[in-house]
Image (cartoon, rainbow, N blue to C red):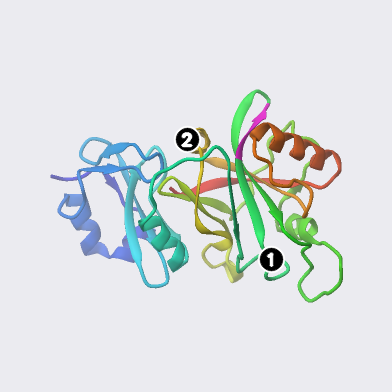
C-alpha cells in the first residue's frame, strides 16, 4: 500500500530514485513506526511521515518521524554517534550532563560540559542547553592564560546576554541534534560552505527529561547558553541552574543563541 511519506530531494539523492520509489510505494517502508523525534507511534499509511537519513563515515540509517515533528532531511554525524543512535535505549533523567572533545571547538582540543534544562522566559518554558568548558579556551595560534571562549562564540554569531528576560535570536547554520529521544550533538556550518559538522558531540547519547523533549518538539528550537569556565558549575536542579545563569548574565559572562532542532 502506498505510504504518506515525505522524501526530501537530499534524501532521494543519497538513497537513489529506485529506493525512494520503493519507499513511497510501501514496499520497503514500515506501516507503523516509533517517531524518532517524539518517541510516540506513527502510521505512514494514515499520516504524513518524514524520512530522516542519518549518514556516518561508513553507515547510513533511515529513520521515520511524524512530519509535524520534523521535516525529511539528511543529517551527517560521526560513525560513533550513528552507532550510538542505533543502539540507543530509552530512559530519562531530571537533568543531564555529558562531556566531549569536539573536533571544532574554538581554540582546539577543549573539553566542554553541557547541561540540559528548561528555562522560563516571559511565562513560557523553553528547552535550553548550557555549555561551559572545563578550562580556559585560547584563540587558535595563541598561547597564554587568556580565555577567548566568549569572544570566539560572539564572532560565530552568539549574542551577549545581560539578563534572562528575553529569548536570543536564531543563529543561522547551527542546530541541535536529538536522535532517538536523546541529545547527540550541537552542529555548526562546515568550512567552505559545506554540510554541518559537530561543534560538540556526546561520547554517549545524553538523556533528557520528557518535559525537555516535549518542549523541544513543540518549539522546534533550543536555546543554547555558553559561559567561561567556572561561571555556571554543575547544578543538580533547574532552579539552581537558572540562578547561575542569572548571575553569569549580570556579570557579563554569558552568550546565547537559538538553534533549530535537527534530526530527531
First in sequence: mark 1 vs mark 2: 1
Quarter in which the N terminus is drawn: top left
**Does residue 126 belong to the magenta stretch?**
no
Question: Which residue is outermost to the bottom?
Answer: 141
Image height check: is 205 above or below 166?
Answer: below
Q: Which residue is drawn at 79% across and 48% down?
A: 231
In front of the other: 153 or 116: 116
Residue 19 location, x and y as percent? 22, 61
Q: Which mark is residue 110?
A: 1
Left or right, residue 9 beside residue 215: left
Q: How crowded is mark 2: few (under 14 residues within 10 Å), some or many (20 or more)?
A: some
Image height check: is 117 above or below 253?
Answer: above
Left or right, residue 46 beside residue 195: left
Figure disc tally: 2
Left or right, residue 113 beside residue 3: right
Image height check: is 226 above or below 106?
Answer: above
Q: Residue 210 carries which label?
A: 2
Local SS, label 2: helix
In front of the other: 197 or 237: 237
Residue 44 location, x and y as percent? 24, 41
Residues shaded magenta? 117-121
Q: Main secondary structure of the magenta part?
A: strand
Amino acid at each position: 500500500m502506498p505510504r504518506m511519506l515525505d522524501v526530501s530531494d537530499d534524501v532521494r539523492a543519497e538513497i537513489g530514485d529506485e529506493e525512494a520509489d520503493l519507499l513511497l510505494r510501501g514496499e520497503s517502508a514500515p506501516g507503523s513506526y516509533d517517531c524518532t523525534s517524539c518517541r510516540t507511534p506513527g502510521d505512514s499509511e494514515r499520516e504524513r511521515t518524514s524520512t530522516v537519513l542519518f549518514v556516518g563515515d561508513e553507515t547510513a540509517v533511515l529513520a521515520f518521524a511524524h512530519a509535524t515533528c520534523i521535516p525529511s532531511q539528511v543529517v551527517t554525524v560521526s560513525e560513533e554517534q550513528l552507532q550510538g543512535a542505533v543502539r540507543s535505549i530509552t530512559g530519562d533523567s531530571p537533568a543531564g550532563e555529558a562531556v566531549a572533545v569536539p573536533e571544532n571547538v574554538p581554540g582546539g582540543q577543549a573539553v566542554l560540559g553541557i547541561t540540559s534544562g528548561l528555562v522560563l522566559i516571559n511565562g513560557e518554558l523553553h528547552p535550553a542547553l548550557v555549555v561551559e568548558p572545563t578550562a580556559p579556551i585560547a584563540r587558535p595560534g595563541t598561547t597564554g592564560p587568556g580565555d577567548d571562549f566568549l569572544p570566539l562564540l560572539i564572532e560565530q554569531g552568539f549574542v551577549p546576554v545581560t539578563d534572562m528576560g528575553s529569548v536570543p535570536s536564531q543563529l543561522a547554520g547551527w542546530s541541535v541534534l536529538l536522535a532517538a529521544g536523546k541529545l547527540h550533538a550541537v552542529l555548526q556550518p562546515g568550512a567552505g560552505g559545506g554540510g554541518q559538522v559537530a561543534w560538540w558531540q556526546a561520547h554517549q547519547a545524553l538523556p533528557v527529561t520528557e518535559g525537555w523533549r516535549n518542549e523541544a518538539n513543540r518549539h522546534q528550537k533550543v536555546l543554547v547558553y555558553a559561559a567561561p569556565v567556572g561561571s555556571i558549575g554543575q547544578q543538580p536542579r533547574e532552579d539552581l541552574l537558572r540562578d547561575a545563569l542569572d548571575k553569569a548574565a549580570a556579570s557579563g559572562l554569558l552568550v546565547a543563541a537559538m538553534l533549530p532542532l535537527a534530526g530527531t
